[in-house]
């Protein structure tokens, strides 16, 4: 009993440290980026996305180093599903999100391509060192291109104001302090979640796909919802897309690099969770291009999809005999997330060409 209480305290403390650390890291890093004249969208796609993905980096790398492959892979895959279905869904319910043309034409396509590439790399049942090198190299290329395009767009639009950025040393200190809190918080979260899994008889994979994925994605939730409430709706969408790209290229890439053995990918992840993750990425294309906004109804649809996904995971973990096989369920997700938005788009007509260019 005492152990359970201690684990719960550690888990809650870990989540609190993750949120506080991400806030400090994003605040400091965002102001540093502004001082360099980078547009808000690029800040959301790179600096904010990398900052809010730091919990996934710390948790996944620690899990990989400990040999907890299910927790490492489950955290990345579960976080990517959570980022689109919950982070974007909840943000859009709070306020319809603006999706820029640049996000649709470049970054969303990168997210789809990388999701499919990871699905292909994992098809042999593991993410090895060479896979990790390829993914991390992709992260470097993507970041350089995104910053270059963002600086060009910002220069063509108007000079970026840097007066409110604050002293560079203070912003750097915020970022370093935030990173330290993230590392400590992730350690508490991993240890507590692993203890919960063992005590409840639930696999580390399910814990990684749900509890840990949601916990490490809380910075994305807080950042995107706050951005939507404050009218910075491009940052909200860019944060979710950028975090997904960072999770796959940086987090999974580094996990493959530092793990003493290839990071094993469970058959259940290959059959169900990775295809769902790829479908979620593909679904962003028709949803984003629908008037270049994510409407409240579409946000609600994303939240419903996450509820169904989580329910299937829980029931499958309990061994419900009446559940359909993963294949038909994946087809059902495809119809819900891809076909339904396309049908709605056909009914309402083609998207109006008024998307922002940023």
Image: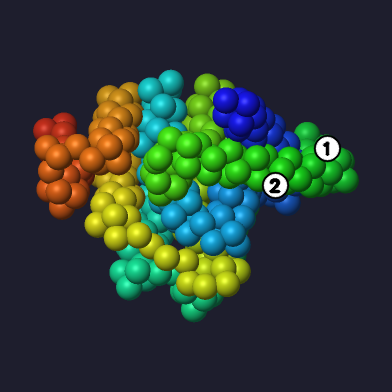
Residue 192 seen: yes
In the picture, the disc for residue 258 is: none
**Residues packed near mark 1 inside 10 Å, few (<14), some (14 to 19) or many (20 plus):** some
Residue corresponding to mark 2: 183
Specify which label sits upstream in the sequence, 1 or 2.
Answer: 1
Q: Dot 2: within a 10 Å radius of its alpha carbon, few (fewer than 14), some, or many (20 or more) residues?
A: many
SS label for mark 2: helix
Q: How many marks?
A: 2
Q: Residue 210 versus residue 150: which sits nearer the camera?
A: 210
Image vertical order of residue 176 relative to residue 305, above or below: below
Q: Position of residue 108 (x, y in %)?
A: 39, 52
In front: 358, or 78? 78
Q: Residue furthest bottom?
A: 130
Label 1 to label 2: alpha-carbon separation: 26 Å
Residue at point 52%, 68% (across, down): 256
Q: Which quarter of the figure has residue 230?
A: top right
Q: Residue at (48%, 72%) from the top-left corner?
A: 262
> Where does the image place residue 105, in percent across and percent down from the top left?
37, 54
Element at label 1: loop
Numbered badge on residue 166:
1
Tell me: 4 left or right of 322: right
Residue 216 in the figure: left or right of residue 181 = left
Residue at the image point whose x is 19% and y is 37% from the top: 320
How is this picture coloured? rainbow
Question: Quick check: 179 left or right of 349?
Answer: right
């Amino acid at each position: 009993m005492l152990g359970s209480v201690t684990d719960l305290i550690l888990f809650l403390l870990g989540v609190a440290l993750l949120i506080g650390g991400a806030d400090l890291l994003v605040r400091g890093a965002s102001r540093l980026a502004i001082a360099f004249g980078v547009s808000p969208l690029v800040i959301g796609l790179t600096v904010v996305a990398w900052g809010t993905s730091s919990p996934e980096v710390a948790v996944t790398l620690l899990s990989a180093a400990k040999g907890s492959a299910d927790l490492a892979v489950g955290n990345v895959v579960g976080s990517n599903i959570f980022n689109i279905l919950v982070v974007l869904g909840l943000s859009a319910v709070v306020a319809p999100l603006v999706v820029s043309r640049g996000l649709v034409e470049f970054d969303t396509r990168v997210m789809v391509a990388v999701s499919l590439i990871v699905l292909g790399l994992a098809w042999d049942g593991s993410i090895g060192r060479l896979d990790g090198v390829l993914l991390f190299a992709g992260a470097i290329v993507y970041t350089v291109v995104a910053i270059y395009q963002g600086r060009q767009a910002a220069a063509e639009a108007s000079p970026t104001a840097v007066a409110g950025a604050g002293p560079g040393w203070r912003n750097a200190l915020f970022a370093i302090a935030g990173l330290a809190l993230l590392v400590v918080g992730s350690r508490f979260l991993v240890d507590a979640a692993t203890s919960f899994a063992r005590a409840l008889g639930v696999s580390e994979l399910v814990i990684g796909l749900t509890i840990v994925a949601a916990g490490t994605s809380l910075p994305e939730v807080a950042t995107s919802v706050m951005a939507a409430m404050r009218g910075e709706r491009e940052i909200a969408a860019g944060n979710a897309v950028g975090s997904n790209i960072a999770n796959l290229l940086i987090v999974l890439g580094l996990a493959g690099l530092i793990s003493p053995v290839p990071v094993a990918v469970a058959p259940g992840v290959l059959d169900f969770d990775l295809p769902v993750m790829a479908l979620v990425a593909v679904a962003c294309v028709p949803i984003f291009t629908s008037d270049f906004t994510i409407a409240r109804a579409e946000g609600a649809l994303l939240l419903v999809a996450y509820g169904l996904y989580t329910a299937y995971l829980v029931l499958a973990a309990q061994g419900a005999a009446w559940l359909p096989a993963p294949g038909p369920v994946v087809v059902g997700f495809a119809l819900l997330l891809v076909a339904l938005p396309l049908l709605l788009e056909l009914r309402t007509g083609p998207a109006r060409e008024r998307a922002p260019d940023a």
